[in-house]
Amino acid sequence: MDIDGISIKTAEQLYDILSVRSAAELYGLTASDLEKIDGFKDKKIYNFINAVQKSKSVDLAHFIGALCIDNVGRKTARDLAERFGSMDALRAATAEELVEIPDIGEVVAQSIVEYFEKHGEVVDRYRDIGIDPHYEKKEGALTGFKFVLTGSLPTLTRGEAKNMIERAGGIVQSGVSSATDIVVAGEAAGSKLEKARKLGKKIIDENELIDMINA
């Protein structure tokens, strides 16, 4: 859940001294509980409790990622958040619906379905605590467009280009598919560019991408 101030040492202390066995249990800890841990004084206790409460505002993609579902990384978590919009909708999704999402195959889809069949109570517990995130769609110049980056761009790294697209509301895919709208191609683009041409996808360069963002 990206809670500030919880180091490996602190996690070990919470486990050994307070018998914390899940992240959800952190939200029930009190100042009296934390006083039992060496090194936890007034300021550290206040900062810890404040950080835990602040983490309740987690966005849906990070929440899905924090569940540690097998085969679900950050990109897949983001794709799931965008496609389903809420935990209720994701929990109700079938394997057939999941594999319709680009880059999610049968193995990943089955991992997601099985997780909620076995651990649905974990999500219920977070909701009882007050954590029930929903996806807030970013609006920008690239909202609704799905991009693929390929090759070396003149001035931007792959990560910089990805961040620019996402900040403008666009989505970056790992591979070209029928769902792809635009391919940003640089030097030595390779097979992704060839596939984009075969599928008749729009192909642009770095300058055209920047122009789209600034439009």
Image: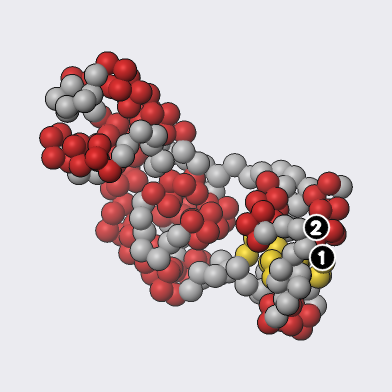
Q: Nearer the viewer, residue 163 or 109?
A: 163
Which amino acid does the dot numbered 2 rest on?
Answer: Leu
Q: Where on the picture, by quarter, is residue 177?
A: bottom right
How far from the left and from the top, in percent, is residue 202?
81, 70
- Report crowding for label 1: few under 14, some 14 to 19, many 20 or more residues within 10 A (C-alpha): some
Choose between 88 and 77: the one closer to the eye: 77
Asked whether the residues under the numbered discs 2 and 1 touch, taking CB atoms below 8 Å apart as contact, a structural biologist would say yes
Residue drawn at x 72%, y 47% is 168
- State the separation of the CA atoms marked 2 and 1: 6 Å
Q: Which residue is mark 2?
A: 209
Where's residue 35, x and y in %? 18, 21
Q: Which mark is residue 205?
A: 1
Residue at x 35%, y 55% (from the top left corner):
68
Helix, strand or loop at mark 1: loop
Q: Quadrant of residue 101?
A: bottom right
Q: Position of residue 1 (x, y in %)?
A: 39, 42
